[in-house]
Image: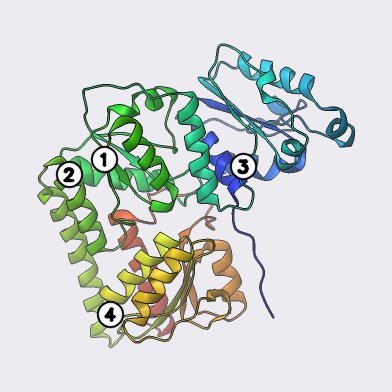
């Protein structure tokens, strides 16, 4: 039996780029079917856009366009409107958006609306307006996300300045698992080295952050496929260099990431490296305790299904640090990263499969939903969540999937699965 599953597409990636503006407002020109799921996702991954928790009042958004969801109102195109157009309806919704006084308004055509050639230039006002005729629908989520960021930067232009200070973080979206925890973790490490993070491009930034983003001395990539083209844009347009050392997951990768940033800025990485060393000691104590009970992680098998750069970092870390054996890696839409991972695994003489959903392994690293699916089918003995969607509704404590906290979190998940299967007490 073959298991079919859906990955986030370029349309959702672009919507999350637009929704990543904390003081922005996004309109979908299209039917309700293109609104419900993305609106629910946006609300769940970025519930406190202005930093203020508040009770959700569905009656406040019970009117047409919103349909009881506070995010991503739509013009609810129906069969007749696909023929005659819905410019008047779009203008009406745009005026409602203006009355809420956002700093940026984004308008995007749904796939159906883009086919009829609706003119998005029909809506305009004093508020900067990002207009997206269509997404590259056959592209990946990361493609759509970067396209969306470039559309934003083309409308709300960063202001050129000769005074450069601090860094921007690039290549992370509000769609990434526990994205705010990741940003906090990496900000903490850079802060130890005296490096100021000006903003995170595409994830929780404001209109002012966008305008001031060209004042950074350096751009630093987190998930490369979500930011490499944006980094090139800043380099070509504003002369800002960037660092791309892959996903900072695993002690060695994290140290390399910190050293590269500090080297580019002529900063001392010692404080952050000392913090990472503390994490190494914590992990070593846990591994040593397991070994005292003859529970060795070495040789246990795992598979990975996630974005390419994250998969590569996870394979490097678990193989290099714990001696675990990667038996299957699937990186949908990321052939380059999948090939790079396959070369790494094959260079160590390990048989390799690119079908993680149909290859037996003890542990799978993937999203919570796919992890549960693999566990219920008896394909694995346990799973570790490293990408969205996760299975937890509430996180009281920070749970970054990458960074120092993410490295320890991954070890915690993997070691507990191994221990629990062997009745470790």
- Which numbered disc, 4 or 2, marks the residue closer to the eye? 2
Q: Between disc 4 and disc 2, whose residue precedes?
A: 2
Q: Nearer the viewer, residue 247 or 399?
A: 247
The N terminus lies in quadrant:
bottom right
Please give the residue where the numbered disc 2 appears in the rendered image. 264
State the image quarter where residue 44 is shown: top right
Give the crowd class for mark 2: few <14, some 14-19, many >=20 residues within 10 Å. Answer: few
- Label 2 with label 3: CB-CB less than 8 Å: no
Report x, y in % for residue 170.
Answer: 37, 42
Q: CA distance from mark 1 to mark 2?
A: 9 Å
Q: Nearer the viewer, residue 84 or 368?
A: 84
- Label 4 with label 2: CB-CB less than 8 Å: no
Please give the residue where the numbered disc 1 appears in the rendered image. 241
Callout 3 secondary element: loop
- Label 1 with label 3: CB-CB less than 8 Å: no
Q: Between disc 2 and disc 3, whose residue precedes?
A: 3
Report x, y in % for residue 300.
Answer: 38, 83
When the figure is inspected, residue 418 is found, relative to residue 199, above or below; the finding is: below
């Amino acid at each position: 039996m073959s298991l079919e599953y859906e990955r986030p597409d370029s349309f959702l990636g672009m919507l999350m780029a637009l929704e990543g503006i904390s003081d922005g407002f996004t309109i979908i020109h299209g039917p309700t079917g293109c609104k419900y799921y993305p609106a629910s996702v946006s609300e769940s991954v970025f519930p406190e856009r202005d930093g203020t928790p508040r009770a959700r009042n569905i009656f406040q958004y019970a009117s047409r366009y919103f349909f009881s969801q506070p995010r991503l109102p739509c013009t609810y195109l129906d069969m007749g409107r696909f023929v005659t157009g819905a410019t008047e309806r779009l203008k009406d919704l745009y005026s409602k958006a203006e009355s809420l006084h956002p700093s940026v308004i984004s308008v995007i055509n749904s796939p159906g609306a883009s086919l009829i050639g609706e003119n998005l230039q029909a809506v305009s006002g004093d508020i900067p307006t990002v207009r997206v005729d269509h997404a590259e629908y056959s592209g990946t989520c990361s493609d759509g996300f970067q396209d969306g960021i470039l559309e934003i930067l083309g409308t709300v232009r960063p202001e050129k300045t000769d005074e450069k200070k601090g860094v921007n973080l690039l290549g992370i979206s509000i769609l990434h698992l526990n994205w705010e925890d990741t940003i906090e973790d990496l900000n903490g490490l850079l802060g130890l080295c005296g490096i100021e993070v000006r903003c995170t491009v595409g994830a929780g930034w404001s209109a002012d952050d966008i305008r001031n983003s060209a004042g950074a001395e350096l751009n630093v990539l987190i998930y490369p496929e979500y930011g490499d083209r944006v980094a090139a844009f800043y380099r070509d347009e504003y002369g800002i260099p960037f660092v791309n050392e892959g996903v900072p997951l695993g002690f060695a990768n994290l140290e390399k990431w910190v050293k590269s940033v500090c080297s580019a800025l002529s900063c001392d990485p010692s404080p952050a490296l000392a913090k990472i060393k503390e994490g190494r000691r914590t992990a070593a104590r846990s591994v040593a305790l397991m070994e005292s009970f003859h529970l060795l992680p070495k040789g246990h098998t795992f598979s990975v299904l996630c974005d390419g750069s994250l998969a590569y970092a996870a394979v490097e870390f678990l193989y290099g640090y714990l001696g675990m054996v990667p038996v299957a890696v699937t990186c949908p839409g990321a052939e380059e990263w999948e090939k790079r991972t396959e070369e790494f695994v094959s260079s160590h003489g390990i048989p390799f499969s690119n079908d993680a959903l149909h290859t037996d392994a003890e542990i799978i690293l993937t999203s919570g939903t796919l992890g549960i699916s693999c566990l219920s089918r008896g394909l694995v003995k346990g799973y570790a969540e490293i990408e969205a969607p996760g299975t937890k509704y509430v996180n009281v404590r920070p749970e970054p999937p990458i960074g120092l906290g993410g490295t320890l979190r991954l070890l915690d998940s993997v070691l507990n699965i191994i221990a629990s299967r062997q009745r470790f007490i």
